Image (cartoon, rainbow, N blue to C red):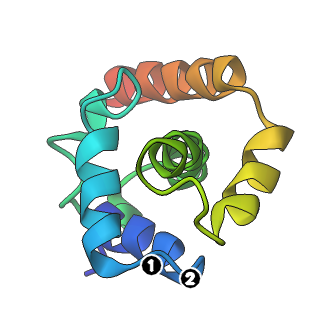
Amino acid sequence: MTTIRAKLESLLDARCMFPEDIKQIIDGWLETDTGKPMAGRLDDEAAGYPPTLLPVCWMSLSHYTVEWIDKNCPQHWARPMFAEETARVSRTEVQRRFDAIAEELKATS
């Protein structure tokens, strides 16, 4: 079983974030408006959710990661990897996509 958390951690790790940073980033993201709805779901099996959920979580987490890097280690050499990804999709668009998935999940439960 691969959880949503494990997949997000793997994506952060692949972009050279340190394990202690990964934990802080995910914990902080779970306190954001977009992350909060995922708080009780991160340890669920990823395959049990619509395939669009993980990419939207990743877009939101990437935006948060840029903020986290800017606040905690602004010279972090991994920042450009996240900044490039977040430049493609605005926070507003991420929220719109997240809301659509939430509605889809409500309709099927």
Which residue is rendered at x = 33% and y = 67% of the image?
A: 21
Question: Horizontal placement of 25 versus 87: left or right?
Answer: left
Which residue is identified by label 2? 14
Label 2, label 1: how many angstroms apart (C-alpha)? Answer: 6 Å
Q: Secondary structure at mark 1?
A: helix
What residue is at 50 percent from the left and 30 percent from the top?
Answer: 101
What residue does disc 1 label? 10
Toward the viewer: 1 or 64?
64
Which quadrant is the C terminus positioned in? top left
Question: What residue type is disc 2 on?
Answer: Ala
Residue 76 in the image, given as x and y percentages of width and height: 58, 66
Residue 42 in the image, given as x and y percentages of width and height: 24, 54
- Circle 1 Cα neighbour tier, 10 Å, few/some/many (<14 / 14–19 / ≥20): some
Q: Secondary structure at mark 2?
A: helix
Residue beneath the point at 55% across and 52% down: 58
Above-or-below relation of 86 to 43: above
Q: Position of residue 95 (x, y in %)?
A: 57, 21
Depth check: 74 or 1 in front?
74
Question: As displayed, is residue 64 above or below residue 105?
Answer: below
Question: Left or right of 80: which side holds 67?
Answer: left
Locate residue 99 relative to residue 20 in the image: left or right: right
Q: Quadrant of residue 92?
A: top right
**Dot 1 amino acid type:** Ser
Work out whether residue 23 or residue 97 is closer to the camera in this orientation and state it.
Answer: 23
Numbered circles on residues, count: 2
Q: Residues within 10 Å of mark 2 (few under 14, many from 20)?
A: few
**Residue 19: mark in rendering:** none
48, above or below 68, in the image: below
Q: What residue lies at 62% left-to-right and 18% top-to-bottom?
A: 96
Do residues under tags 2 and 1 come within 8 Å of each other at their CB atoms?
yes
The N terminus: image quadrant:
bottom left
